[in-house]
Image (cartoon, grey):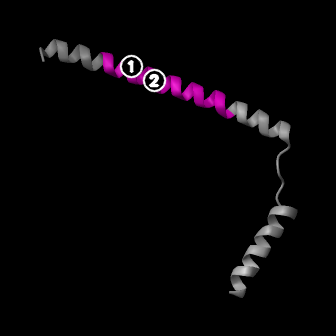
């Protein structure tokens, strides 16, 4: 049980004294960057899905199915 207590104490100490936490402004900027990137990737995937759907529909119509 002593090992678990020691681990928790060391983890707590590391989080308080050794980890560099971002400032509120940095956190807001990186969040906006992530949201913009997410929107771009979502748009690209949606476009690819739409194109694939249209291509497959065209092929099925050509084959008469």
- Crowding near the residue tagged with mark 2, few <14, some 14–19, many ≥20 C-alpha atoms within 10 Å: few
In the displayed structure, 64 sits above or below 23; it is above
Direction left: furthest residue:
64
Disc 1 target residue: 50
What secondary structure is marked by label 1? helix
Q: Name the quadrant containing residue 18.
A: bottom right
Residue 1 lies, in percent from the top left, at 68, 87
Magenta part of the protein: which range? 34-54
Compare residues 5 and 51 and report the one nearer the observer: 5
Q: In this rendering, would 37 be left or right of 59? A: right
Magenta span contains residue 30: no
The answer to whether residue 64 is visible is: yes
Q: In this rendering, would 26 be left or right of 62? A: right
- Crowding near the residue tagged with mark 1, few <14, some 14–19, many ≥20 C-alpha atoms within 10 Å: few
Residue 16 lies, in percent from the top left, at 85, 62
The residue positioned 76% from the left and 69% from the top of the image is 11
Residue 10: assigned label: none
In the displayed structure, 20 sits above or below 12; it is above
Q: Are marks 2 and 1 in contact (CB under 8 Å)?
A: yes
Residue 52 lies, in percent from the top left, at 34, 22
In the displayed structure, 60 sits above or below 41; it is above
Task: Kindly report the distance in space between the C-alpha atoms of the residues bearing marks 2 and 1.
Answer: 6 Å
Disc 2 target residue: 46
Direction bottom: furthest residue:
2
What secondary structure is marked by label 2? helix
The residue positioned 78% from the left and 40% from the top of the image is 27
Compare residues 43 and 16 and report the one nearer the observer: 16
Compare residues 9 and 43 and report the one nearer the observer: 9
């Amino acid at each position: 049980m002593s090992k678990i207590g020691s681990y928790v104490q060391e983890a707590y100490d590391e989080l308080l004294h050794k980890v560099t936490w971002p400032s509120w402004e940095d956190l807001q900027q990186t969040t906006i960057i992530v949201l913009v990137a997410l929107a771009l990737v979502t748009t690209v995937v949606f476009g690819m899905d739409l194109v694939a759907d249209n291509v497959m529909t065209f092929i099925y119509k050509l084959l008469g199915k």
